[in-house]
Amino acid sequence: MKSEQFKSLCQAVEDKFGQPLKTTSNFEALANAMKHKLSASTLKRIWGYIEDRDQFSQTTVDILAGYVGFQDFNDFLKRSILNSHDQRVLHVATEIAGKITAMHSDRCEKAYDLFQCRRYEEAYALFDPEEMHAERQTLCENFTSYTDNIYTLINELIIKAHLAWCCNWTKEEILKEISEIYNEALTLSKAINNHNCLWEIYQEWAFKNMQTDNLEQAFALYEHALIQARIICMETQEEYVYPLTSSLSDISVLLLWQGMYDQAEVFLKEALQHNDRTFADLYVRINLGIVCFHTGRKEESADYYTSALKLARKLLKNDPELQEIQFGHAIALYHWGELCEESNTAKAKKCYLQALKILKKNSEIPNVFYSTYRVMCEAQLKNL
């Protein structure tokens, strides 16, 4: 496993250890720091201090990832890819395109042209705060057009936050900037008492915090999103449960990242009760399978993955081009392969190959998680 991702993991280990691994005493000290979960001789082989052509086991690689604060190597891949600048851009590309092209304003069209040219800071600068504040004041003075036009301003603020997310700034600068933007968008949304806007803002803001490992803030924002989702569900007499299912699922992912499986399961089982039967429900079943897998309940895990695969196939019959369903299908196959790996490597390999085929077929789609799972599938196949 001498991939670029594995080299990055080794570098992360060295960075945490605080010194390069070049001598026997260095490797012995690292083994001691890792509480001898890996021996000094194993560490020497990994770093090439001792020549060895054998592949390292998945357990060995997972221990290395655990040393630098990740759940396992897959978690390292997922989190490291999510934090890269290019992948931040990928995450919001589709949303920016959808919102900007729907706005039909000169400012938005110019911003989209700049975005496509990767001139993110220039696109962001078009959304001048003083100019937008003046527009807001005009709307407030002319109340008859206020409600009709306030949605435009809210959406422009959401676009502005996405563009700030794409700027090549420090994490602290980005978080400070998007906090100010989202707070203004929240103020406007509360003024017109629009729970759908409030839910969308809290969801996006929470996810951006999660991507930058600001987990405590992310959880607080997801809780706010969940409140709005419950209101939406109540007001529609449970006819529109997608926001609620989605929020419950997203909170569970945040908990899964931290290894808080029992807490994640509570949210996921509530989501399952609503029987959404959309792609949100698909992800709920996958995440429940992950919970059971990591808590040693392999049979339950298999049941959830099986139900997720059945739901994915059913949804694909109705909407074969919807990328969220295709991606959910690929994730379910990946985790089904992970479950099969211990007892049936041939079946595991088949699952990984099927998942990879779906992901490669959709390689042009600007979605951060597509690229994340492609890397994870390729890494697992190399290990088999």
Image (tube, rainbow, N blue to C red):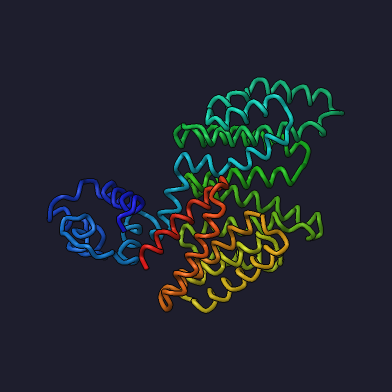
List x then y, in percent, for residue 352.
Answer: 47, 65
Vertical side of 182 occupied by 69: above or below = below
On screen, residue 59 above or below 370: below
Q: Residue at x 69, y 35 (%)?
A: 101
Give the answer, above or below, for where 168 lies relative to 238.
above
Q: Nearer the viewer, residue 131 or 280?
A: 280
User: Which residue, as the protein is rendered here, is positioned at the far left?
Assistant: 24
Q: Is residue 294 visible?
A: no
Residue 254 percent coordinates (x, y): 53, 55
Query: Looking at the image, which residue is at 58% across and 27% down?
Result: 114
Residue 60 in percent (x, y) is at 30, 64
| Residue visible at 51% across and 72% down in the picture | 292
Q: Is residue 65 left or right of residue 339?
A: left
Displayed quadrant of residue 48: bottom left
Q: Is residue 259 visible?
A: yes
The answer to whether residue 203 is left or right of residue 137 is left
Quarter of image, res 361:
bottom right
Look at the image and tell me in which quarter the N terminus lies. Answer: bottom left
Question: Residue at coordinates 69% horizontally, 61% vertically from top-left?
Answer: 278
Residue in the foreground of this view, choosing between 34 and 57:
57
